[in-house]
Image (spheres, helix red, strand yellow):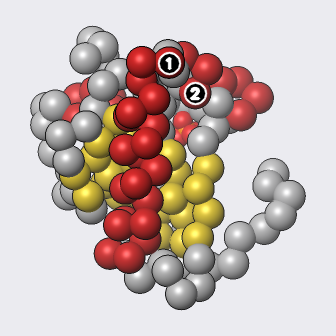
Amino acid sequence: MQNECIFCKIATKQIPVEPIYEDEQVIAFPDINPAAPVHVLLIPKMHIDHLLAVKPQDSAILARLSAAIPKIAAKLGLTDDGFRVVINTKKNGGQTVHHLHYHILGGRSMNWPPG
Ligand code: 5GP
Ligand code: ZN
């Protein structure tokens, strides 16, 4: 838990969300400002700043995040048409919340290359 981290507050239920998926290590919830018809954020409950801050001993968390994606996709009806997973990292990646999070975007065709 890092003080003043909004996603730590969501993970610890200080800020309520409607979880799409949750287990003891990760939680997924709707993005407050959706960029697609389906826009879910998937986070580790443990505070990790970003992908570059993942330590070797955190690899089980990454596995848990990966394992949650198909469950979330199935729950949200994304498995037929597919979806996109985005991990914005630091300044050039466009990261604005400094707690590792996966964006799961779906419900429309995504553009490539991304902006
Ligand atoms: P980033 O730009 O860091 O990759 O993504 C941060 C995301 O968090 C943005 O899409 C933004 O809309 C979302 N976000 C920021 N604050 C909150 C919040 O308090 N609740 C929820 N559900 N999403 C948030
Ligand atoms: Zn945090």
Judged from the image, the secondary structure of the residue bearing numbered disc 2 is: helix
Judged from the image, the secondary structure of the residue bearing numbered disc 1 is: helix
Q: Real-space Cα distance between discs 1 and 2?
A: 12 Å
Residue drawn 43% across the image and 66% down it: 70
Sequence-wise, the earlier of marks 1 and 2 is 2
Residue drawn 32% across the image and 75% down it: 75
Q: Is residue 72 visible?
A: yes
Location of residue 37 in the rendering, given as x and y in whole percent from the top left corner:
50, 74
Location of residue 55 in the rendering, given as x and y in whole percent from the top left corner:
49, 16
Residue 6 got which mark? none
Q: Residues within 10 Å of mark 1 (few under 14, many from 20)?
A: few
Res 7 quadrant in image? top left
Question: What amino acid is found at the position of numbered circle 2 in the picture?
Answer: Leu
* Image quarter in which the N terminus is found: top left
Q: Is mark 2 within 8 Å of ligand 1?
A: no
Q: Residue furthest right?
A: 113
Res 57 quadrant in image? top left
Q: So how many labels did they put on this image?
A: 2
Residue 51 got which mark? 2
- Vertical order, 1 against 25 (above or below): above
Q: Nearer the viewer, residue 113 or 53?
A: 53
Q: Nearer the viewer, residue 17 or 47?
A: 47
Q: Going by the image, does 13 lie left or right of 45?
A: left
Location of residue 25 in the rendering, given as x and y in whole percent from the top left corner:
25, 37
Location of residue 97 in the rendering, given as x and y in whole percent from the top left corner:
48, 30
What residue did someone put label 1 on? 56
Q: Going by the image, does 24 lie left or right of 57?
A: left
Q: Going by the image, does 28 lie left or right of 95?
A: left
Q: Residues within 10 Å of mark 2 (few under 14, many from 20)?
A: some
